[in-house]
Amino acid sequence: MTSIDREFIDSLPKAELHLHIEGTLEPELKLELARRNGVDIGQSTVDEVRETYAFTDLTSFLAVYYPAMEVLVTEQDFHDLAMDYLRRAAADGVVRAEIFFDPQAHTSRGVSFRTVIDGLWSAVQEASSLGVDAALIMCFLRDHSAVSAKETLESSLPFRDRIVGVGLDSDERGNPPEKFAEVFAAAKEAGYRLTMHCDIDQEQAITNIETVLHSIGVERIDHGTNILENPALVDEAKQRGIGFTCCPLSNSFVTEEMKGAEITTLLREGLKVSIASDDPAYFGGYVGDNIAALADAQNLTREDVVQLARNSLEISWADDERTEVWLRQLEELVSGGGIITT
Ligand code: ADE
Ligand code: ZN
């Protein structure tokens, strides 16, 4: 058991870079939105909603996750969802939040792209009052067609200045990265930054990681710890400063374990590993809980935890000046507060 206390973890300025806004739908808000929008979800108490949050792998998780979104209908709903998350993030010391959203999960059920982006964008603007610099990353659903991803990219272009980058999520099985090579190239051309999920222990995981690094040209990989299967790719990712956004609590729900040893190995080998919460309403904790769980399981030192925070700031897509300020704050906290005692 580590001696790292929660107060220490929360005190560190950090960036959260792997957070699906739809995955922050807590049962309380789900019930409120269902009432507000007159949607019959089949449950009427928090416990009943929680009981539906049962899954053993990525596919069974996604089968619960998408239907739950039916309560998200209006611009106000998306705003409220994002504000609830941002308040929790601020309490965990998050100074920069790069928030994934899945337009196709909403446009496919008749909610317009504008409704989604207007609601999220007003929350992004309001986030500064909480001390959080927020940004939006649009994810394509990899189990939908490449044509649908292309159409989604087109829909996003009028809102180009509200979206910092694009990602790829949903079910990796049978949906390798090369299916989206063209749309990612077009997104890059339009000025978007690039990241992609390489989920844990997927079939062809290492092949997909290689494709993402060599053919897609991402700056970050979401999850991605299977890279350890190929030491040459580990070296390459280190040389290139590729960011990794790892989610221990999520891993322990959709695989056998949190992959703490793998995350710690990559961190201590000097790769740019950061910790995030993925879908915190479903996986039992926000970013501070994820760092604490990893620290406990792996007996992390305070230096390790500081390095995770430092990495998260370094690999974020925030303005350089802001990043420098946060990094300076982190270093001052570490040196001034005498908090490294190991
Ligand atoms: N969408 C939301 N969470 C996801 C995850 N962990 N992997 C892939 N797609 C997701
Ligand atoms: Zn994810």
Image: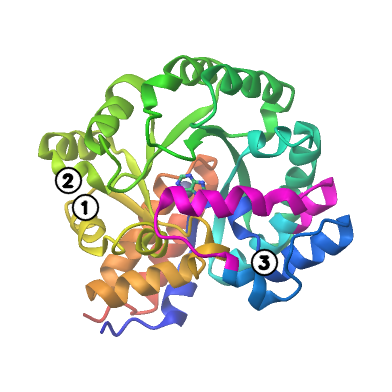
The residue that mark 3 highlights is 87
Residue at 53% across, 43% down = 318
299 shown above or below 241? below
Q: Main secondary structure of the magenta part?
A: helix
In the rendered structure, which amino acid carries the disc numbered 2? Answer: Leu
Give the side of residue 278 with respect to residue 34, left or right. Answer: left
Instruction: Tell me where residue 84 sits by quadrant.
Output: bottom right
- Residue 300 makes an appearance in the image: no
Answer whether residue 84 is magenta in the image. Answer: no
Compare residues 118 and 162 and report the one nearer the observer: 118
Label 3, residues with CA under 10 Å away: few <14, some 14-19, many ≥20: some
Label 1, residues with CA under 10 Å away: few <14, some 14-19, many ≥20: some
Compare residues 313 and 53 and report the one nearer the observer: 53
Q: Do the residues labelled 1 and 2 touch (CB within 8 Å)?
A: yes
- Give residue 228's mark: 2
In the rendered structure, which amino acid carries the disc numbered 3? Answer: Arg
Instruction: Tell me where residue 136 sits by quadrant.
Output: top right
